Image: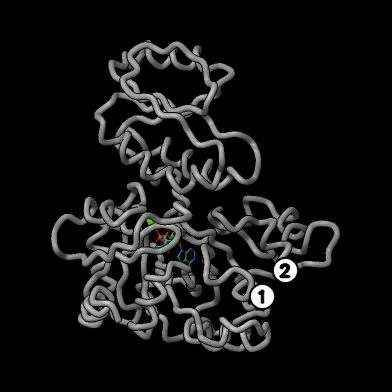
């Protein structure tokens, strides 16, 4: 076992915190069965208690083999440690998308700490794909509770260096697993209300609703059960559990972030600038954008491929935030579902920015 993994296991066993690389973002990991360790996550992040944490699990050996049934049995066994009722749907999604950027909300097992669930009857579970996360989980031999390794309300870290910026003391041992490949947090799908709501996405991510519906209803020509039932419910009778990532002001840079529609960019800009009188502006746009803005001190051209932008977005926002400009003027993202999760994060970043 590499030294870095052994050291991290020692820290976790002693109730400490580890900055863990995953394919989505870096996590701030602690032993999911140690109350004191879990409390450290909340105090280090400045996260209000009551916001539930995701439990990360290792991929069971048997699920690696190309045998769907053996694999489902293996997933059931490991998931039963965390959930009292592992539905067939949960096993289908585990088989299809784990290890990977998908978190499932399941009915919690009795022994799951209420510090993890925020006192709710449900628990979020994810099997991450990053090889370092897998090595750590296997060597540790238990579940790791891990929120994104940023201070509450700030941008999620996608490199080890970002984690060190967030926690500059020595309270967190950071393992460097390189830059995160996906770059935005996992999709969260709620499977606790399948009868009434279907498989309900609480936070969009790389695994889309269409991919989930397709996995659960491979033969249906029209929309799957999930989609049909979802459309019959209204916002008002939908009591979504507490998801801190669902607060509108989240993932936010300190610098004012303005997302503009290129069709009326000049008007938007002059209206805002008249009030604020920006002296230094970072302009972020797709290739071919044409605008004549005053006071642009930094210009960044966005990748045209959604996966590339997801991978780069948080590092880009962190970098722009460090430039001490008055405003980040950011071209809005194209339509299309492949941009949905990034649009969601950019929107939240914009709402919480400049505070
Ligand atoms: O990609 C990810 O999911 C990353 C990496 C580290 O795995 N983790 C992450 O954790 O984004 P965090 O805590 O920053 O966001 C997890 C979200 C929170 O908004 C939390 O409220 C929600 O998951 N969550 C966790 N358990 C839940 C539950 N039982 N019911 C509803 N939401 C839950
Ligand atoms: Mg987070």
Quarter holding the N terminus is bottom left
Note whether residue 355 is visible: no
Disc 1 residue lies near ligand 1 with CB under 8 A: no
SS under mark 2: helix
Which quadrant of the figure shows ligand 2?
A: bottom left
SS under mark 1: helix
Of residues 93 and 42, the one drawn nearer to the viewer in this rendering: 93
The earlier-in-sequence mark between 2 and 1 is 1
Q: List x then y, in percent, for residue 318.
A: 32, 41
Q: Marks 1 and 2: in contact by CB < 8 Å?
A: yes
Residue at point 56% right, 16% down? 264
Of residues 179 and 200, the one drawn nearer to the viewer in this rendering: 179
Residue at point 35% right, 47% down? 155
Residue at point 24% right, 29% down? 324
Furthest-right residue in this view? 221
Of residues 110 and 283, the one drawn nearer to the viewer in this rendering: 283
Q: List x then y, in percent, for residue 38.
A: 29, 72
Left/right of residue 318 with respect to residue 119 in the rendered view: left
Crowding at mark 2 (Cα within 10 Å: few <14, some 14-19, many 20+): many
Quarter holding the C terminus is top left
Q: List x then y, in percent, for residue 50.
A: 37, 64
> Which residue position holds label 1?
92
Seen in the picture, residue 115 relative to 318 is either above or below; the reply is below
Residue at point 36% right, 51% down? 156
Q: In which quarter of the view is residue 142 placed?
A: bottom left
Q: List x then y, in percent, for residue 103.
A: 52, 66
Note whether residue 142 is visible: yes
Seen in the picture, residue 119 relative to 265 is either above or below; the reply is below
Indicate which disc residue 216 carries.
Answer: 2
**How far is disc 2 from disc 1 in space, using C-alphas?**
7 Å
Left/right of residue 313 with respect to residue 161 in the rendered view: right
Seen in the picture, residue 156 relative to 320 is either above or below; the reply is below
């Amino acid at each position: 076992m590499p030294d870095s993994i052994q050291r991290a296991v020692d820290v976790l066993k002693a109730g400490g915190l580890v900055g863990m690389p995953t394919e989505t973002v870096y996590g701030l990991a602690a032993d999911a069965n140690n109350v004191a360790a879990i409390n450290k996550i909340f105090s280090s992040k400045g996260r209000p208690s009551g916001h539930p944490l995701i439990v990360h699990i290792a991929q069971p050996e048997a699920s690696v083999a190309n045998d769907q049934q053996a694999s489902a049995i293996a997933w059931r066994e490991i998931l039963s440690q965390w959930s009292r009722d592992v539905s067939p749907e949960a096993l289908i999604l585990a088989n299809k998308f784990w290890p990977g950027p998908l978190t499932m909300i399941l009915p919690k097992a009795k022994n799951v700490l209420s510090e993890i669930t925020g006192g709710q009857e449900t628990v979020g579970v994810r099997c991450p794909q990053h090889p370092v996360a897998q090595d750590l989980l296997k060597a540790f031999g238990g579940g790791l509770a891990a929120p994104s390794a940023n201070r509450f309300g700030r941008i999620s870290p996608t490199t080890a260096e970002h984690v060190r910026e967030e926690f500059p003391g020595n309270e967190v041992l950071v393992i460097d697993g390189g830059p995160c490949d996906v770059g935005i947090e996992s999709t969260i799908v709620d499977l606790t209300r399948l009868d009434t709501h279907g498989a309900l996405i609480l936070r969009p991510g790389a695994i889309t609703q269409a991919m989930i519906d397709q996995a659960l209803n491979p033969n249906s020509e029209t929309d799957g059960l999930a989609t049909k039932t979802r459309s019959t419910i209204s916002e008002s009778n939908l009591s979504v559990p507490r998801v801190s990532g669902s607060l509108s002001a989240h993932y936010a840079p300190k610098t004012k972030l303005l997302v503009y529609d290129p069709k009326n960019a000049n008007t938007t800009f002059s209206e805002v600038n008249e009030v604020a009188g920006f002296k230094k502006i970072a302009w972020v746009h797709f290739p071919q954008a044409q605008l004549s803005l005053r006071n642009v001190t930094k210009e960044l051209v966005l990748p045209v491929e959604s996966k590339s932008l997801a991978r780069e977005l948080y590092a880009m926002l962190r970098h722009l935030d460090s430039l001490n400009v008055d405003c980040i003027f950011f071209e809005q993202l194209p339509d299309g579902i492949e941009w949905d999760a990034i649009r969601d994060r950019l929107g939240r970043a914009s709402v919480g920015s400049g505070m």
